[in-house]
Image: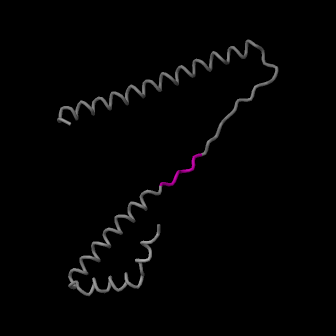
Amino acid sequence: MFSFLKFLSPVRAYRDLRRFLAQRRPHELVFMMAALFLTVLVIAGFVHDSRVEVPYKKSIIYVESWPLNRSEAEILAQQKIDVQKKREQQAELEKKQAERRAEFQRLDNQLDSWGL
């Protein structure tokens, strides 16, 4: 299975590299080193850019404190207030989504006019 490993030798690889480098002209070695440097630089840039630090965000959850002796009428009144707040928030969200869709639609129309 690993019979090909008997053909691998660090000493022979070193000799082969020395022979390869001895046959090259000085300007070829300079360009080879420049090409290797640029390749390593691009790969290092991709490796560096691939690390994304996740910013820490505090997640604070506020809880309302209610007295235990609330009446049913108080609970229903608060629920009506909460439903109204939720509707307002939902309407605001839908308005923002509609604006965003319109913005993307304008961009799409502009790209269509350019033939893209």
Q: Which residue is drawn at 75% across and 26% down?
A: 66
Number of marks in the rendered image: 0
Quadrant (top left/top right/bottom left/bottom right) for the C terminus: top left
Q: Residue at x 36, y 28 (%)?
A: 101
Residue 38 appears in which quarter of the rendering?
bottom left
Magenta residues (range): 52-57
Q: Residue at x 32, y 31 (%)?
A: 103
Residue 73, above or below 50 = above
In the picture provided, is 105 more to the left or to the right than 6? left
Q: Where is residue 98 in the image (x, y as percent from the top left)?
A: 39, 25
Q: Main secondary structure of the magenta part?
A: loop
Residue 16, above or below 73 = below
Residue 109 appears in which quarter of the rendering?
top left
* Coloration of the structure image: one colour
Q: Where is residue 83 in the image (x, y as percent from the top left)?
A: 60, 18
Q: Where is residue 88 in the image (x, y as percent from the top left)?
A: 52, 21
